[in-house]
Image: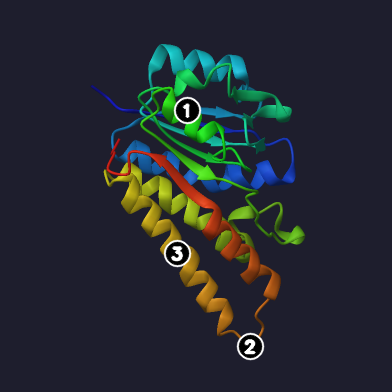
Amino acid sequence: MTKTYLLTRPEHDDTMHYLSNWSKGTIDAAKKAGIKVLDLNREKATKKEVEGRLKDLSPILVVLNGHGDENTVTGHQNEPIIIYGENEKLLKSKIVYAISCQSAKVLGQKSVDAGAISYNGYNDDFVFFYEPNMISKPLNDKTAQMFLEPSKIFIETLIKGNTVEEALKRAKDKLRSNINRLLVSSEADANMVRYLLWDLNHFVSRGNLNATI
């Protein structure tokens, strides 16, 4: 049976624009691995579309780019798409990565309790810096790269058949490498170091660490 990868890529503000573009490479990686891709981009990143795909097509890997809080991940125009107490059961038998603020704090564990294999994300705010003059070319933004490339590594490590634990390790190793590179730089930005460390410490996994897609 062909494996399926679902991702949401809203682009209605600068943050979502960056996350969406940095997720593009994972689409190519999945296709090369023979994985079917359900790319819910821009106006398609809605609750109705997400729920329909989760119910009908049963993707094994689900990546949610969105704003969030401890109970919710949002999509296009900040519409709540996964909500604790309403539809987290749709994540049953899936490996999930939410690139959003806080959702791993409550929604993550409740999703696992409802049958998700693994829920990965952040138990507090997810923070990244970017260069405003690079907004039209987010993939060339070296500042944003330090924060967003680890997420790309996490997803692509799963796509290659590695465990959740290995994906988490490689992503965190990249964050540590970026922190160390800044610390030895003569132009180190203390705030960047602080928030790379913040993302490192708040990136968590709930559920089965040995799971693979």
Q: Amino acid at mark 3?
A: Lys
Image height check: is 198 above or below 2?
Answer: below
For the point 70% across and 70% down, which residue is it? 191
The residue carrying pointer 3 sits among few (fewer than 14), some (14 to 19) or many (20 or more) residues within 10 Å by Cα, namely: many
At 62% from the left edge and 71% from the top edge, which residue is drawn?
A: 193
Q: How many marks?
A: 3
Secondary structure category for the residue under label 3 = helix
Contact? badges 1 and 2 (CB < 8 Å): no
The outermost residue toward the left is 1
Q: Residue tagged by mark 1?
A: 111
Residue 203 picture location, percent across and down: 51, 51
Q: Position of residue 44 (x, y in %)?
A: 61, 22
Visible in this render: residue 38? no
Q: Which residue is mark 2?
A: 186
Image position of 186 (left or right of 25): right
Name the quadrant containing residue 40: top right
**Location of the C terminus (image quadrant):** top left
N-terminal of the two: label 3 or label 2?
3
Counting residues from the start of the chain, the first of labels 1 and 3 encountered is: 1
